[in-house]
Amino acid sequence: MISKTKVLELFEARFDYTSARIVLADAMAKAGVTAGKDGFEPEDVAKLPGALAALGLPRVDALASGLAALVEVPAGKGKAAPAPEPEPEPEEPVEEAEADSAKAKAAKGKKK
């Protein structure tokens, strides 16, 4: 569900308080959309940009983009993609570490 408040905020960014409600009602009628008690279904909000274009209103591109963004990431459901886990550093095999240690000790012994 997308809240009515979020949709109205987008309309109010383009139109004044009263005009926002009138244009929203016109767009809803044109798209055949009704708002439920809790708000709009994402499918219904997706129809509104096309209805705005059909109404022939100027300068509604940002409004249409905002409506599309609401459909893509419903309120409260947007999460950042998880960061990829870093690859673990390869550990040196124990046998090689012991051999290197033995070589180091042998080299120390020869120096004396």
Image (tube, grey):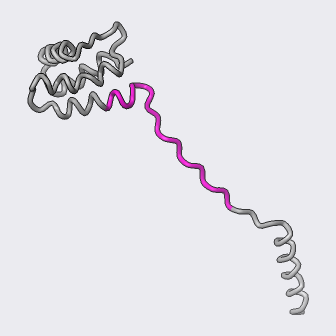
Q: Residue 54: where, in percent of width, then height?
A: 14, 24
Q: Residue 110: where, in percent of width, then height?
A: 89, 91
* Residue ID at (12%, 17%): 19
Q: Quick one: quadrant of the C terminus? A: bottom right
In the rendered structure, does residue 34 fall within the stretch colored magenta? no
For this rendering, which residue is in front, 83 or 53? 53
* Residue ID at (32%, 32%): 69
Side (left or right) of 61 relative to 33: left
Residue extending farthest to the top is 37
Q: Residue 65: where, in percent of width, then height?
A: 25, 33
- Our reading of the magenta stretch's main secondary structure is loop
Q: Residue 68: where, in percent of width, then height?
A: 29, 30
Q: Which residues are magenta?
A: 69-89
* Residue ID at (53%, 42%): 82
Residue 4, picture quadrant: top left
Side (left or right) of 102 relative to 18: right
For this rendering, which residue is in front, 111 or 40? 40
Q: On screen, 102 above or below 3?
A: below
Residue 104, picture quadrant: bottom right
Residue 61, picture quadrant: top left
